[in-house]
Amino acid sequence: IVVAAGHSEATYEIALSSFKAGIRHAIHLFNASAPLHHREPGLVGAVLASREISAEIIADGHHLHPSMLKLLHSIKGMRGLTLATDAISAAGMPDGEYLFTNRKVTMLNKKITLPDNSMAGSSLTMIDAVKNMIGLAGIPLHEAVRMASLNPARVLGIENAKGALAPGMDADLVLLDNDLNVKLTMTGGEIVYRDGKSGN
């Protein structure tokens, strides 16, 4: 179990005390947290100011403005960021109305909202998160891929088996074409997806 901070109104001081108590990761940075303020930096400011705390972000173009993706990268670097999708079951589906936790949500232009217009998860896929870090934030491919692979594995403490292509690893890999479209997915050395088909 990895205890992480997120979706929090914690003050800067409380956030720092949580880091001293062992928290080393923040989820969904900026989202559902007290906004960053120059005199009251809160959890967000504490995460940005603490080199040892990694930050998970939802790079769908809705949860965070592209300029914030660039800012986060400039502060945390390629080692300090992990990508998350926060995807709900409507991911990959066309625009329309769906049920999420027994509540009606609307997806329009890949943005998912509740009736009060607040966001409810996302329709993001991990490959689109990688593409967005490249296209929206101008981050090199190898850095964006690291944020989706090795960095999350390190947060979970499983970097000796996941997150890289090396001898002794679990042989989980994704093969992409030049346009970063997924062509093949392998899990534990077994092909589970190939060019629009599941399985071998």
Image: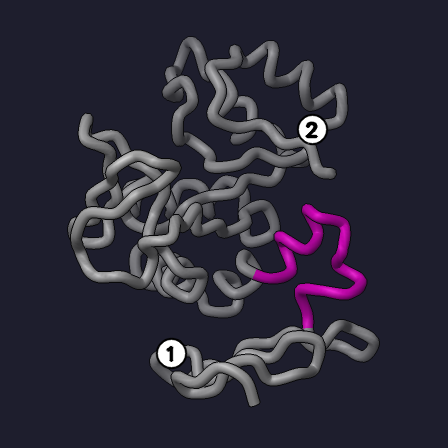
State the mark number for residue 3. none
The image quarter in which residue 116 lies: top left
Residue at which label 1 appears: 181
Question: In front here: 71 or 115?
Answer: 115
Across and down, in percent, residue 108 comes to 16, 49
Q: Earlier in the sequence, mark 1 or mark 2?
A: 2
Across and down, in percent, residue 37 comes to 38, 16
Q: In the rendered view, would you say 48 is above or below 191? A: above
Structural distance between the alpha carbons of marks 1 and 2: 35 Å
Q: Is residue 80 visible?
A: yes
Residue located at (52% from left, 68% from top): 142
Across and down, in percent, residue 176 comes to 46, 81
Q: Is residue 156 magenta?
A: yes
Residue at which label 2 appears: 23
Label 1, residues with CA under 10 Å away: few <14, some 14-19, many ≥20: some
Label 2, residues with CA under 10 Å away: few <14, some 14-19, many ≥20: some
Q: Secondary structure at mark 1?
A: loop
Magenta highlight range: 149-164
Residue located at (67% from left, 64% from top): 163
Q: Is residue 6 magenta?
A: no
Q: Residue furthest right?
A: 168
Residue located at (76% from left, 50% from top): 157
Give the side of residue 167 with respect to residue 15, left or right. Answer: right
Question: In front here: 12 or 104?
Answer: 104
Question: In front here: 79 or 172?
Answer: 172
